[in-house]
Structures are given as C-alpha cells and as structure tokens.
Amino acid sequence: MCKKLLYLWVCCLLTLGVFSCGSSRKIVSQTSLEEKDPLTPQERRKYDYYFLEAVRMKQKGCYDDAYQLYQHCLDIYPASAAVLFELAQFYMFLGQQDKGEEALLKAIRSDENNFWYKQTLASFYMQKMEMQKAIAVYEGMSKRFPARLEPLMSLVELYNRTKSYQQVVNTLNRLEELDGKSEQISMEKLRMYLLLDDKNQAFTEIENLSKEYPYDMRYQNMLGDIYLDNDRVEEAYQTYQHILKEEPDYAPTLISLATYYQKTGQDSLYRVQLDTILLNEEVQTEAKMEIMRQLIMQNEQAHADSTQIVNLFDSILSRPQQNADLAMLGAQYFITKQMEGKAVPVLHQVLSLDPENKPARLQLLSYAIRDNDMDKVIKVTRPALQYNPEALEFYYYLGLAYYQKKETEKALDVFARGIKQVNEKSDKAVVSDFYAILGDLYHTKKRQEEAYAAYDSALVYNADNIGVMNNYAYYLSVERKNLDKAEELSYRTIKAEPNNTTYLDTYAWILFEKERYTEARIYIDQALRNGGEKSWVILEHCGDIYFLSGEKDKAVEYWKKAEKVASGEHKEEETLPSAEEMALLKKKIILKKYIAK
C-alpha cells in the first residue's frame, strides 16, 4: 500500500515541484506570529503530530498514508492553507481537477500572502489553456507583490500568447519602472509597436534607448537600421554618418551603410563600401564571410566571370587574418573553379592559421597522392600526427610514403603509432588495412611471427580482406609452413576474384608445395591467361610446376620467358628479381632442372 500512489506523485513533483518546494517553507509555521492561533493547545499538538507524520510518510514514498494523515489534519483544522495545498496536488494528479482547483482556491483564501500558492494556481490555469484566468491571477499577484518581477514577466508571455499587444506594452512599461530600461525591454516594446502599426512610438522607443546610452553605438546603429527598414532612408543615412564620424571603423555601421547603398540603388558606392568592409581588419570575419557568400551567389546566378571574386579573395587574404575561415572559403571557391594553382597556397595559409584544419590537410594530401609525390605526402601528413593524432588516414598515408621510399623503420614506427589510436569508433576496414601493411613490413624485416600476428589481427577487423589472405597464404607457402591454412586462405581469394592473376598464382604455388601438380597446372594456366605472362615470378612458377608435372622442355621455355621479362628495362625497380633470385633462375635454365629455393 505504501507505494500505491507513487507514479501519480512523481508526476506531481515533475509538474509542480518548484511550487511544492516553495510551499514547504511556509508549512513549518502554521500560523502567523502576529495572529492568534485558531486551535487550542491540545488541537495544535494533535494537528502538528499528524502534519509532521504526513510529511514524513510523503518523504518515504508512502503516499496513501500521507493522504490519510493530511485528511486527519483537515478534520482538526479545515482552513489549513498548507494542508489544502498538499491535498490540491493529490486531487489534481488523481485526475480530480475540479476538487484540486477548489482546494487550491481555499488554500489561497486562507493565506492570501502566499506567493507560491498563487503561482501554482496560475500555472494550473495555463496548463488547462485558460489564459484569461491565468492573467487574472497574475494581475492580482502583481498588485499584492508589487516588488516582484515574476508576475509581470508571466503577464508579458500571456498577453503575447493572446495577441494583446497593447497590454504587452503596458506590462513592459511596468517592468521598466520596476527594473529600469534595458535593451531587451525596449526591443520587445519596439516589436509590439510595429505589430500595432504604431511606427512613431517604435521610433521613439529606440530613440530613447540610444539617448540613454549615447556612447553605445549599437543602439544608434539599430536606430539607423530601423529607419532604413521603414523607408526613412535619409534619416538612416544621417544616423550612419553620425556614428562613423565618432567611430570611423565601426563595423556594424559600415555594413549597414553598404545595405543603404544597395537599397537606394547606388551600385558603385555599394561595391566601394563592400571593398572597404572586406579589407577592414576591424570588421569581424563572420560579417566578411556573409558578404563573400552573397557575392559568390550573385556572381554564380549572373553567370559572371569569376575574376572579380578571385581578385577580392586575393586582396582579402593578402592581409592579416583573424582566423582561417575566410582562407578556407577562398580555398573552397578555388577548388570548385578548378584553380588548383591558387587553391594550394591558400590551403597552406589555412594550415598556418589553423594547423588542426583536417579538411584543408586532406585536400593537400589528395593532390600529393594524385601526383605520386611521396615527399609532399610526408610534408603534409607528418605534422598531422601532432595536430590530428586521432585521424588514422594520416598515419596510413605517411607510413605508405615511407614504405615506398624504402624507409622501412620509419614506416614501421608510423603504423605502430597509428595502431595505438584505434578505438571502438575506428573504421574496422581501415584498421584491418593498418595491420595488413604492418604484416608486410614485418615480413620485409624477416620478423615472420610478428607478420603473421599482424595478418591475424587484420582478419579479425575485416574477415573479408582478401589482400591480407593472399599475402598471408603466399608467405606461409614460401616457408612451407601451415600449408592447409595457406590453401584455405588462398582459395577464398580466388572465389572472391576468380580472374585475379596474383591470387591464381598464389593458389597454384600452394598446390605445388603440397605436391598436387596437376591441380597446380590448372590454376597457373589460368593465371597466364589473365595476364600472368607479364610477370617473371608467375612465369618462373609456371616453369617449376611444369617441370615437376613431367613437361621439362615446356618448363625451360617458361624459365627463359621469365628471364627475358625479368631483364626488361621497362620494368619498375621493385618488380625486378634480386641478384640471388636471378642467379637461381639462370641456373635452372642452364641445368634444365628445377632447383628448390
């Protein structure tokens, strides 16, 4: 029974908790010290006992018991405001709205000076969308509690909701008398006057505000803007000129004056004013950004030449910048216009202003990768490890660049540092590629166990990484180690890409190492048909397989083809055999015999 009303009471606390807290300050003292206690001493002791017990039960969550105890209190003292307030909450959230309202009204009649009871009643009416009743309560509160701002602020909201704009103005005037003139009140009054179509009062309001704060140019500029918005252009112009006489570089007025020139059709002055703003270091970047976006949009809509925009960006970006935003906007514009020559130095300017700007760095990286310029890749990505340490792509391309430059130790270090940045949010495919390249690097350094561990990790993150499967399988076969696993991995690669020459060669070689020469010939022939004759490795494998299949003449023919391809000057350096590999190939040809490595 103790928790029976728990849900309803929680709702009560959520909706009216603030007022309940307020009332709790009132209920400790049941009568004013200046008034005679209406209860006898015996009734008072009994009442206080039940009341405190009710409070205790409520705090324990025993709401049924608390309700019963409050009823006992009411039997002793029917006019108890504190008890009536507590019971009102029970009634309301038991769905007995009428009884709740009645109890709340009784509580207020018993304690007319309790602010929180009346606040609760007004909120209750607002929830029921009975706005006029809520207004009546707040108006009464504003008279009984003339020093408090809350009733007047609530009345402003209610009169706004009921579109009683003149009443909003009246209430704002009362707030102003109580709390003094402020921008917020004046602007709200201005808005009301405009809704009432009383422009004279609107102008008077903002004029008074600017007079009250004559050294705050914001209000004077606001006055000029209101003049301009209401076609009092001459007064607007005079206001702007007055401000600029006092503060020649005041950015908001410079922008407002540009709007004035545009609105009055003075296009040449408008352009001059825009240049003045864009080249003024006192004007905030946000304002310049907005102007440049508008100019770009107008230029595009008119299908005009981009020279004007380009020249503007050149002029702006040649000056000191507050931040990287304008430079980034310029870079994006140049990229859109395919002006890479102008985009690249601006992107570098962005990074000098904001080294953590990842999009700018990625754009520069894309150019370097496209040009296959590993030195540029390194130059762009190396600082990123400091400024964007969580971005795996920078580790990836920096490591690859070192790898291609045969700086293996540096590549290993970069990839090892990149792996430390991996977390649950990292792209699993990217992490898999990290481990794949680590595996290749470890293999290059003849650290085979670490290589295989890296390949296993790569497949944990991406079980379908067929590039990893191929390398893993091939290196196992070369070591003649765990050939069953090698065959399983390699078979998955040719199922995924049945015409891939490299994967067919790997599978054929694994079958060769397992002495399944007939099957090996089937797959090595497929590799040749899919372009394998361009690879000295595949041709040499083909000769080895044919030799142990019993076709020795055919084997020698393939070894000779392998030698010819391996000796070709058109081949890139990394595809050529080592001196030891070339010597072994020549030895096979001379002896006309397969020689195992």
Image (tube, rainbow, N blue to C red):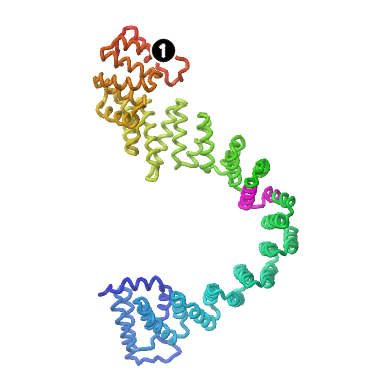
Residue at horizontal 73 percent and vertical 51 percent from the top: 267
Q: How many numbered dots are placed on residues in this image?
A: 1
Q: Position of residue 200 (x, y in %)?
A: 69, 72
Check if residue 142 falls in the magenta segment.
no
Q: Is residue 78 left or right of residue 570?
A: left
Q: Is residue 68 above or below residue 214?
A: below
Q: Is residue 245 left or right of residue 289?
A: right
Q: Position of residue 327 (x, y in %)?
A: 60, 44
Badge 1 amino acid = Lys
Q: Position of residue 67 (x, y in %)?
A: 31, 80
407 or 75, which is in the foreground?
Answer: 75
Is the N terminus in the top left, top right, bottom left or bottom right quadrant?
A: bottom left
Q: Pointer 1: what residue? A: 564
Which region is colored magenta? 275-298
Is the C terminus in the top left, top right, bottom left or bottom right quadrant?
A: top left
- In the picture, residue 480 is in which quadrant? top left
Tell me if residue 198 can be seen.
Answer: yes
Q: Position of residue 4 (x, y in %)?
A: 28, 74
300 or 512, which is in the foreground?
Answer: 300
Mark 1 closeness class: few <14, some 14–19, many ≥20 residues within 10 Å = few
Tell me if residue 149 can be seen.
Answer: no
